[in-house]
Image (cartoon, rainbow, N blue to C red):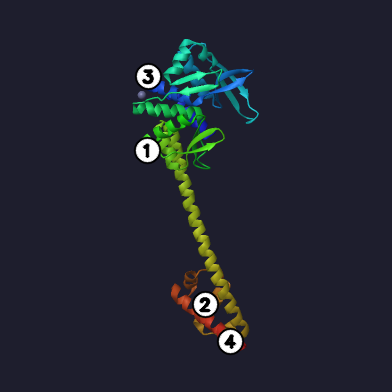
Amino acid sequence: MSFSSDIKDELCRLHNEKPCCAFHELAGILRTGLIIREIGKKNHLLFITEHASVSRTVYSRVKEMVPDGVEISGEKTTRFKRHMVYRLDFTGITERDDGIRLLDSVGMNVNLPQQKVEYTKLDIKNKCCIRAYLRGGFLAVGSVSNPDKSYHIELSFINGLIADEFMSYMEFFELKPRIIQRKNYDIVYMKEGQDIVDFLNVINAHNALLEMENIRILKDMRNQVNRIVNCETANLEKTVNASLKQVSYIKYIDERIGIENLPEGLKEIARLRMENPEASLSELGKMLKPELGKSGVNHRMRKLQQIATDLMEKGK
Ligand SMILES: [Zn+2]
């Protein structure tokens, strides 16, 4: 199951306690989700979704208000092989008084023969109802990418005015949505993990919010661990590169004069370095008896380097 499906299933299980919110949720669904398509030379008013829970919710909510106004059918799409697409046909509600009243109450005037829908602005006063309206819109035209992969939430609108309306209602909750055009759609989207968490909070998808927070924490930890590992790798590389240089000096000295002819302290560190090319300077220091600090070891290494370069000079 996708993260979007989880959220929508959760939202469909929510019970709108107040009738004002139930109404505005439905308004959000209908104003964003209803589209006109020509089927068999006749224009139909449709609501199409891949989510079974959403199709059931929309179907039963409209049927309560307009009995016999909606037909439901499922079809397999060729686009998503595994997916079932649910098609609710609302054409019936445009032919009945109670249906037209419902559309009118959500600010929609549908003219099927001319393939046109006019929207009047809904003036939503209560905060609870704005939440419900946004929730309805998300149920109909929203999606969220799997947060394991990326942070992206979007709502795609066929009508620019409705897109603007949603932008301003989202901004009312201090969200910072952005908008782009894609084909014939206005896409309202956000790309920050925090934006998605905030939006889920606004529409009362609290389980999804918690799941998202858990994934964010895990991701942060994973990034931190990766950073540490990368950092250690970089340090290790530095150590190894320095060590290879030291080993080459020491080999040169050994070939020219023999390590055993070096002063005691240098002889010892040269031998240890040859035997432990991967060790850091402080690790080498700890192998000495008595132990020697990092700077002490570094000092001896520089002496070895000096001897080697002197030998090279002489060898010219
Ligand atoms: Zn309300």
Q: Residues within 10 Å of mark 2 (few under 14, many from 20)?
A: many
Q: Earlier in the sequence, mark 4 or mark 2?
A: 2
Q: Which is more toward the observer, 264 or 62? A: 62
Image label count = 4
Q: Residue 30: in sight, yes or no? A: no
Residue at image mark 3 = 19
> Based on the displayed image, in which of its 4 quarters is residue 130 positioned?
top left
Q: Residue type at mark 4?
A: Glu
Identify the residue at the far front of this view. Answer: 114
Residue at 48% x, 23% y is 118
Q: Residues within 10 Å of mark 3 (few under 14, many from 20)?
A: few
Residue 307 on image: x %, y %: 54, 84
Foreground tag (2 vs 3): 3
> In the structure shown, which secondary structural element does the residue marked by tag 4 occupy?
helix
Whether ligand 1 has any atom under 8 Å from the Cβ at mark 3 is answered as: yes
Residue at image mark 4 = 313
Vertical position of residue 155 compared to residue 116: above or below: below
Foreground tag (1 vs 4): 1
Residue at 45% x, 34% y is 208
Alpha carbon separation for disc pair 4 and 2: 23 Å
Residue at image mark 1 = 174
Residue 68 on image: x %, y %: 52, 11
Residue at image mark 2 = 269
> In the structure shown, which secondary structural element does the residue marked by tag 2 occupy?
helix
Left or right, 212 with respect to 18, comes to: right
Q: Earlier in the sequence, mark 2 or mark 3?
A: 3
Report ligand 1 position as a quadrant: top left
Q: Residue type at mark 1?
A: Glu
Alpha carbon separation for disc pair 1 and 3: 26 Å
Alpha carbon separation for disc pair 1 and 4: 72 Å
